[in-house]
Amino acid sequence: MNKILWFLLTASIVACGKEEKISSDEAKLIHNSYASTRLENLTDSLSISTKSLVYWKGTKMRGLGSHEGVVNIEYGHLIFEKGMPQSGLIQVNMQTIQVTDIPETDPIPRKNLTEHLKNEDFFDVDNFPIASFEWAECSLVGENVWNIRGKLKIKEISKPLQLTVQRKGNILEGEFQINRFDWDIAYRGSWVDRTLVDPDILFRVELIPV
């Protein structure tokens, strides 16, 4: 080993072993600068817990009556960039749809309505078991409130959807309304039956990241 290389190697060892002391104020300044840089450039992928739910509500006779329930989220992920949910995918298992406004003490009407929603008159869950929402556009509208734009797919029909999402603690909540005829969620009974059920369905989503 030549003398120059030996000198450089020795100097680097000494420098590595030398303890440099900085003040607490300097340490705090370095930490804050580092944390700020991380937040500004934060990109994180979050999975969605299967405890997340989609709540639905449908009305009839122009709002004089209604039914509501829940559907389970089977899979989901979010991509956060600079603290915003810039993109994501949510998949809902339509075979898990439940009616919650009819008490369990009335099992027959509860079961009948649930099966009615599952059959080809409405969601046709045997042929279309998965509904999904995927987005890649997000804009800030307030503190921890975002407007996201994407595609809602039900029964293999995909249409644009826009909704506002708000962060409440560890939960992301969003609400939107659709015209069921746009996704062929159309009761094919008589004209009276078809018009008895109102066209709009309200959905409220609760996403729990893990």
Image (cartoon, rainbow, N blue to C red):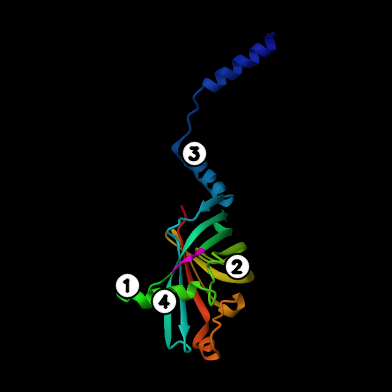
**For the residues carrying marks 4 and 2, which lies nearer the camera in this image?**
4
Outermost residue toward the bottom?
Answer: 192
Answer left or right for 55 relative to 177.
left
Disc 2 packing (10 Å; few <14; some 14–19; many ≥20): some
From the image, tell me which residue sits under label 2. Answer: 153
> Relative to 112, is 74 above or below?
above
Query: Could you tell me if residue 148 is visible in this image?
Result: yes
Q: Are marks 3 and 4 in contact (CB under 8 Å)?
A: no
Looking at marks 3 and 4 on the same chain, the residue that comes earlier in the sequence is marked by 3
Residue 191 place in picture, x, y as percent: 55, 90
Q: Give the amino acid type for the residue marked by disc 4 in the picture.
A: Asn
Identify the residue at image location x=45%, y=57%: 50
**For the residues carrying marks 2 and 1, which lies nearer the camera in this image?**
1
Q: Nearer the viewer, residue 200 or 208?
A: 200
From the image, tell me which residue sits under label 1. Answer: 104
Measure how far apart labels 2 and 1 are at the Cα level.
Answer: 31 Å
